[in-house]
Image (tube, grey):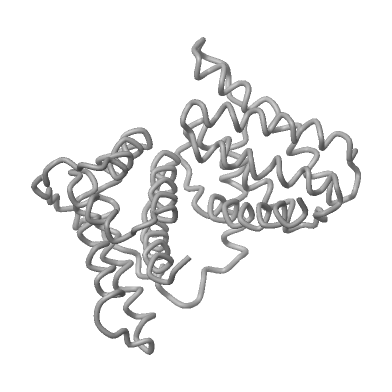
Amino acid sequence: MDLTKLYIIQSITAASNNLRLNTQKIEVVALLRESLVKSENLEEDIKKMKRITELSTLAIRLNEIYNYLSQGQIDFFKLSEKFKEHSRYLIKDLSHMLDMVNAQTLKQSLDKLKEPKPSPASENISIDLSHRKPDEALFEQNPPEVKREESTDKIKESLIMEDEKDDEDSFFHNFEASVLQPIKPLDSILKQMSNNEFDYEELNKFASIMKKNGELSAKIGSDIIANMHKIIAAALMLIKTKNLMPGREVIESMRACLIVIVAVVREKEVDITNYLNRAEEFGRKIFEKTRASG
């Protein structure tokens, strides 16, 4: 990935980490980042985004950042400060976009980037969201204390993973039941892995289930849920073939994938940004290892 694209994606991530996002908005940010990662012509795609009403305000800011990186001479001694500045400015514009779209409407908007003849440019919409003040702590060099985060994470995990009663007979409910049914048994297996008390053959069964549910998730258009399933399925197969050792880091990363799945499916109003970031980073490593071992 080229440095310009990486810089822009990381600045969006930094900005999103400073907003209180529910699971739907986290999915929107993930879709936006994925679109930028896959962009073959970032400059052109940002220009097209400026023509789309719900993306125009954010795209104008991204275009400014792109121009800063691609035109003129960058002072690398001041780059860190400039990154913080860009990320702060993006907070307001990203919040504006998140108030206007959901995952489905964003997909429709991003599909317009692929159209050969874009519609005429629309007027930019400017909404004052200045009351959303950035938290300066995000940009401090020292991260918050781990122990404090751990207690908060335990509460989040409890809220996300708790049982819920069945209350509707619909296609999505059937999908929800299919996806959630294997989560707790698999979570139990992951907890047993730390003591090496699990059956390797059972991993094959769960890998198959996760692959199937991932394909089902992709069919209904939930890329984030589909990706989490693919990561877990690939990791389980690597563990089964002993190409991946189920150490503490691996187990916790797989549990992060499960937590993201449950939170998104149940639409939990809990910030899962850290779990999503951990799961996505784990996924990159797993897919690289899968290609290497295959």
Left or right: where 255 falls relative to 15: right
Residue that extends furthest to the front in the rendered view of this protein: 116
Q: In the depicted view, which residue is nearer to us: 119 or 66?
A: 119
Q: Where's residue 41, x and y in %? A: 34, 58
Question: Which image quarter: residue 258?
Answer: top right
Q: How many marks?
A: 0
Q: In the depicted view, which residue is nearer to us: 127 or 166?
A: 127
What residue lies at 42% left-to-right and 64% top-to-bottom? 10
Vertical placement of residue 146 versus 251, above or below: below
Q: Where's residue 18, x and y in %? A: 38, 59
Q: Where's residue 284, x and y in %? A: 61, 56
Question: Which image quarter: residue 107?
Answer: top left
Left or right: where 41 falls relative to 249: left
Q: In the depicted view, which residue is nearer to us: 142 or 90?
A: 90
Residue that extends furthest to the top in the rendered view of this protein: 169
Left or right: where 56 falls relative to 248: left
Q: Where's residue 177, x and y in %? A: 61, 21
Vertical placement of residue 36 versus 26, above or below: below
Left or right: where 79 falls relative to 249: left
What residue lies at 70% left-to-right and 53% top-to-bottom? 291
What residue lies at 37% left-to-right and 60% top-to-bottom? 12
Q: In the depicted view, which residue is nearer to us: 115 or 234?
A: 115
What residue lies at 20% left-to-right and 44% top-to-bottom? 52
Vertical placement of residue 158 versus 133, above or below: above
